[in-house]
Amino acid sequence: MIKIRHLQKSFGQVQVLKDISTEIRKGECVCVIGPSGSGKSTFLRCINLLEQPDGGSIEVDGRDILDSGLKIDDYRKEVGMVFQHFNLFPNMTVKRNIMLAPMRVLGLSEEESSGKALKLLRQVGLESKADTYPNKLSGGQKQRVAIARALAMNPKVLLFDEPTSALDPEMVGEVLHVMKELAEGGMTMIVVTHEMGFAREVSDRVLFIDHGVILEDRPPRELFGRPENERTKEFLAKIL
Ligand code: ADP
Ligand code: MG
């Protein structure tokens, strides 16, 4: 589904991504771990073209997304993103938050998008909150709405950038549970996370990124069981 070759990205003099190559297969859940500032967010932001890479290639579903002929707006519909901060629209109900993009961007009718929003809210366990405003929700509930909103565009791939890092500890589990169900349902996902339990239990592969380089790209059992790289060992010792 995603083929990345020799991806590079610098900000000014600082090379943040150095020669990143990897592939994500359809239906895979890949976790990305690594120290703060190592380039994890930049990696995701290059995949959905929130940042323009400086070098290398990214193919998504058979298309070169760095081709100058790519229609970026069409491409972005195919790649959903869930952020640490949920970015819900405060002046709209939960259901309206989810309906907005399908109506505006996909051209769905009011009824179609409403039906879809309710179905997605059921999927994330929040059907009863359809007419509630975001400020009445807990952090975990807001993040589940944000996931439903991303799903409403029928993305081919979902990118998560530390989706539980801003949550109180007791709300982390409900969000990870929704993500686990998505992964089990066959969604192609790339998840930047510090939740090693999730990475271990749910992901097919874990990428360890440090200083803009993928130091390990292995199934979680191998990576957590016998990390090969010294820097991976150090990182895991600090975080586990
Ligand atoms: P991570 O998500 O792993 O913590 P980031 O990808 O956010 O790391 O950042 C990697 C490095 O790139 C950091 O040093 C950060 O300061 C820098 N960086 C990220 N985005 C920008 C930007 N828009 N402009 C300048 N520097 C940036
Ligand atoms: Mg980050």
Image: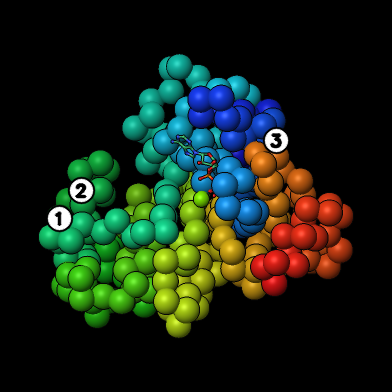
Pick whichever, 147 or 188, lies toward us.
Answer: 147
Amino acid at pointer 3: Ser
Single out the mark in the foreground, 3 or 2: 3
Pick whichever, 121 or 87, lies toward us.
Answer: 87
Q: Secondary structure at mark 3?
A: strand
Chain-order first, disc 1 or disc 2 = 2
The percent coordinates of residue 102 (x first, y second) are 26, 49
Q: Secondary structure at mark 1?
A: helix
Single out the mark in the foreground, 1 or 3: 3
Q: Residues within 10 Å of mark 2 (few under 14, many from 20)?
A: some
Which residue in the protein does label 1 denote? 110
The percent coordinates of residue 137 (x first, y second) are 26, 75
Which residue in the protein does label 3 denote? 21
- Which image quadrant: the N terminus? top right
Q: Left or right: where does residue 82 sit relative to residue 63?
A: left
Amino acid at pointer 1: Glu
Chain-order first, disc 1 or disc 3 = 3
